[in-house]
Image (tube, helix red, strand yellow):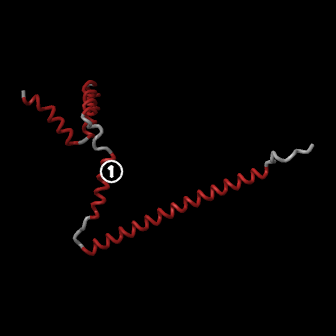
Amino acid sequence: MSSVATWPSQAENWLDARGKGAWIVAMILGFIFFWPVGLALLAYMIWSKRMFNGSCKHRRHDHYNQMRGGLRPTGNQAFDSYKAETLRRLEEEQDAFESFLQRLREAKDKAEFDQFMDERAKRSDAEPKNDEPVTI
């Protein structure tokens, strides 16, 4: 009787070891062969939060941490100083470019606003004023 009680946990561990894709394949096969099994797997995946763990956001965060892990010292003093200097220079260039883009956006906004005000002034000059008497 103990082997009967442990096979669900063994199946769960086996699917967990293979990831979310294995759970999805098992659910689809359950729907294909006997739909209540697929429905039960779907309900279990949602209830146990297996559908939503390991999301893309989590993987992106892991990838970012791996990329930042490249900042660890390699043991080669010359390479580490070259890498640090290059990264510092790239960050300065990025900051300079972002400030350039900000100035460009501000200049564009100012030009558009000035154009709007000029057009508005021309329209108001072209319209007759209501204060002036109309001669017949």
List x then y, in percent, for residue 36.
Answer: 26, 24
Q: Residue at x 56, y 59 (%)?
A: 106
Give residue 55's quadrant in the image: top left
Instruction: Give above or below for 45 relative to 79.
Output: above
From the viewer's perspective, is residue 120 above or below residue 76?
Answer: above
- Please report the residue visible at 48 percent of the width from the left and 63 percent of the height from the top: 99
* Outermost residue toward the bottom in this view: 78
Who's the residue at 8% across and 30% down the image?
Answer: 3
Q: What's the amino acid at mark 1?
A: Arg
| Residue with the most extreme left position | 1
Looking at the figure, which quarter contains the N terminus?
top left
User: Based on the displayed image, in which of its 4 quarters is residue 47 positioned?
Assistant: top left
**Side (left or right) of 121 relative to 64:** right
**Residue most toward the right?**
136
Assign the C terminus to one quadrant of the image. top right
Q: Nearer the viewer, residue 11 or 68?
A: 68
State the residue in front, 63 or 85: 85
Residue at position x 25%, y 38% in the image: 22
Q: Percent x, y for residue 89?
A: 39, 70
Q: Which residue is mark 1?
A: 60
